[in-house]
Image (cartoon, rainbow, N blue to C red):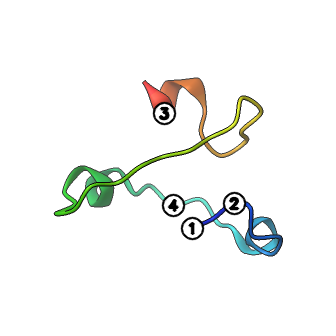
Amino acid sequence: MLKSDGLIMKTYQYEDLTDVFMNLKCPIYLVYGLMSQIFSQEILE
């Protein structure tokens, strides 16, 4: 998912994906901004 996609914020729906991301079989990289409304500090920690 790319937040830079202008349409993503119109269609984004929150879903708890903790288990999915914790069990990935490939590397994942997260890029976020200081003003992120999707990733809170609690989630990032």
The residue identified by callout 1 is 1
**Residue matched to label 4:** 15
Instruction: Tell me the kind of residue under disc 2.
Output: Lys
Q: What is the quadrant of the N terminus in the image?
A: bottom right
Asked if the residue under mark 2 is in contact with the one under mark 1, i.e. CB atoms within 8 Å, the reply is: yes
Between 9 and 13, the one lying in front of the other is: 9
Q: In front: mark 2 or mark 3? A: 2
Q: Are discs 1 and 4 less than 8 Å apart at CB?
A: no
Instruction: Give how far across and how far down residue 13 sits, in percent.
Output: 64, 66
Kind of residue at disc 1:
Met
In this rendering, is residue 28 above or below 37? below
User: Tag 3 or tag 1, which sits nearer the N-term?
Assistant: 1
| Residue drawn at x 48%, y 31% as measured from the top left | 44
Q: Nearer the viewer, mark 4 or mark 3?
A: 3
Label 3: element kind: helix
Query: Mark 1 to mark 3: distance in Å?
Result: 17 Å
- Which numbered tag is attached to residue 3? 2
Looking at the rendered structure, the secondary structure element under dot 2 is: loop
Camera-near label (1 vs 3) is: 1
Q: Quadrant of the C terminus?
A: top left
Q: Secondary structure at mark 1?
A: loop
Q: Is residue 30 above or below residue 25?
A: above
* Disc 4 residue type (three-letter): Glu
Determine which residue is flagged by label 3.
43
Q: Position of residue 32 (x, y in %)?
A: 62, 41
Mark 4 packing: few (<14 Cα in 10 Å), some, or many (20+)? few
The label nearer to you, 2 versus 4, is: 2
**Marks 2 & 3, CB-CB < 8 Å contact:** no
What amino acid is at disc 3?
Answer: Ile
Q: Earlier in the sequence, mark 2 or mark 3?
A: 2
| Mark toward the start of the polypeptide (2 vs 4) | 2
